[in-house]
Amino acid sequence: MDIRELSAATLYKTGAFVLQDPQLLRISLRDNIRLARPDATDEQVCAAAQKAQIWQVIEELPHGLDTVFGAETHLSGGQAQRIAIARALLADSPVLILDEATAFAAPESEAQIQAALNELVVGRTVLVIAQKLDTIRQANKIVALNHQGQVEDIGTHAELYSRGGTYQRFWDERAKATGSQLT
């Protein structure tokens, strides 16, 4: 179905988003997580925060879940990202869209974000928009776009790499830049 035909309410019930910049609001962390489901109980919020690998950080804040983002605390990019993941977990939508979800994460946060994403993707249709090729390597289907944003090829990592084209060039450039074999 063309998503332009969906109402905004239906779109947000059907899909949860974890964007490159999570855009937390200047409200409590509880309410930031509850944006996806305002009627969620504290137990559900805590469970989502635990699965998102952010609960320990929240517990150490001056007012826990009631700590106001931006006024009483500032979070690292990776921590803010895990709040967004908790929000998406709480939404429990059948479709998940990850738009460069680990792009701004520091290396030490990236493992925690990846663990949280592994919890989040179970049982969902997941669309991953990524330039970090390692984040899409295990996908069931990869849609490779050329520099003009047009679909160049569709397949698994192995299929796309073996056919050459933009996808293979991206991998080869990455391997050359890192001095490793990534195929």
Image: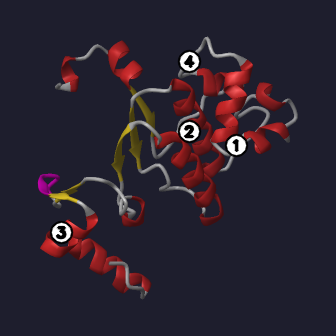
Q: Position of residue 180 (x, y in %)?
A: 42, 86
Q: Secondary structure at mark 3?
A: helix
- Which quarter of the figure has residue 19? top left
N-term-proximal mark, 4 vs 1: 4
Q: Nearer the viewer, residue 20 or 3?
A: 3
Question: At label 2, which amino acid type do we have?
Answer: Ile
- Which quarter of the figure has residue 177? bottom left
Quadrant including the C terminus: bottom left
Question: At label 4, which amino acid type do we have?
Answer: Arg
N-term-proximal mark, 1 vs 2: 1
- Residue at figure coordinates x 63%, y 42% from the top left: 52
Residue 58 shows up from this direction? yes
Q: Position of residue 53 (x, y in %)?
A: 67, 46
Cα gap from disc 4 to disc 3, whole angstroms: 40 Å
Quadrant including the N terminus: top left
N-term-proximal mark, 2 vs 4: 4
- Start-end of magenta stretch: 148-153
Left or right: residue 147 versus residue 170 is left
Q: Which mark is residue 54?
A: 1
Please name the residue that numbered disc 4 is placed on: 37
From what the image shows, is residue 115 above or below residue 92?
A: below
Please name the residue that numbered disc 3 is placed on: 166
Residue 27 shows up from this direction? no
Number of residues whose C-alpha sits closer than 10 Å to that of mark 2, classed few (under 14), some (14–19) or many (20 or more): many
Please name the residue that numbered disc 2 is placed on: 85
